[in-house]
Image (cartoon, grey):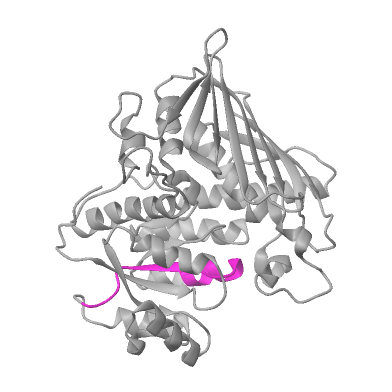
Amino acid sequence: MLNSPLNRKLRMALIGGGGAGFIGKVHRTAAQLDGRAELVAGAFSSSLDRSREAALAFGVDPARAYASWEEMLVTEAARPENDRIDFVSIATPNHLHFPMAKAALVAGFNVICDKPMTTNVADAENLVRLVEETGAVFALTHNYTGYPMVRQARGMIAAGELGSVRAVRVNYVQGWMRAVDPGQPAARGIWKDDPQKNGPGGTIGDVGTHAYNLARYMSGLKPVEVLGKLMTYSGRQLDDYGHAMVRCSNDALIMVTVSQVTHGRLNDLSIEIDGDKASLTWRQEEPNSLLLRQSGQPQRIYDRAPGQAHMNDAGNAACRIPGGHPEAFFEAFANVYASAYDDIIWRNSGGVRDVHATVYPNVYDGLEGVRFVEQTVASSKAGNVWLPLSR
């Protein structure tokens, strides 16, 4: 991580996060975990009173709590340069990501956005153009890319330790929809079953985007086409179970399996990567270990142990505390923020970045994820046909 030449903390504004939702509070906590940023403003709710209540709870001056994100962007952009926000974090229902991110970029702010980036490919392509035009930092919070052992595995694969990657199997299995009665109002997240607010994919969009992004991030494979089969077992409008098979440019295959209706499963994300020299396995519920297998050799478990000989630079850089002290969800989320901060500081100091090559998921990854959801849904509806993923 870089030390800030600004001699101050970055100033953050948060859109959302003031209600019962989970992810807004995660953004707030992760963004400030390393003491490199502070939350100074926000449109935490569509009600001014509730937004101000949230501001007080978050330690934000109620005068910088807004009833609308539009008002916040206009007012913050008009503040003196030494007082205005540096970036906007977006933690809202999916259909709001595009207009908020677009307006923030146009107003001159960097953006850190929850996934999926938009609900359709056209809007995602629009954001790509805006980021290229403005040079702004745009990070997408696929937080699983921030786990130390995920970055360790990515470095091992890039260094050729697995040889050529032939196949990836990634499963993201939950069971929380089993407790949801489709005939009763939900306590939160009811918008996730509304195609106009959530986008065309249900579970494939909610957790499938994470699974697909993780496969791409770790393996470096280049997707060419996808075949999807999605099902709905819970009585909801959108899919809650499914498979997507992705063929890559070297004829390697990525198989994504998702479910939110599997009994007894909490947040079981796992990935296996097969190379022609060795294979790797990682599970999010046991995140501090990485399993390597080679035919004819004993299995090797790589523990998260910063500074040890088996750890590479990528894995070490993602660690905060000594081995044996577990690092997990918040720390991984904070790693995405920390990597984006490095680029924000670099940009503010006049540096030129390669927006294609970032350690954190960027606007191009966001476009890939939206295209993956859109084409998987289309493939399933068309009777499980192969559809293109490449641009």
Residue located at (44% from left, 43% from top): 147
Check the image and report above or below for 17 versus 353: below
Q: How many marks?
A: 0
Quick check: is 86 in the magenta stretch? yes
Residue located at (49% from left, 47% from top): 144
Check the image and report above or below for 364 versus 314: below
Residue ranking furthest to the top:
296
Where residue 245 sits, quadrant-wise, is top right
Residue located at (18% from left, 66% from top): 8
Instruction: Magenta stretch: give its range.
Output: 83-101
The x, y position of residue 284, in whole percent, is 54, 43
Residue located at (44% from left, 27% from top): 302
The x, y position of residue 93, in whole percent, is 59, 69
Which corner quadrant holds the C terminus?
top right
Where residue 166 sits, quadrant-wise, is top right
Residue ranking furthest to the front:
324
Left or right, residue 318 beside residue 295 = left
Check the image and report above or below for 222 versus 264: above
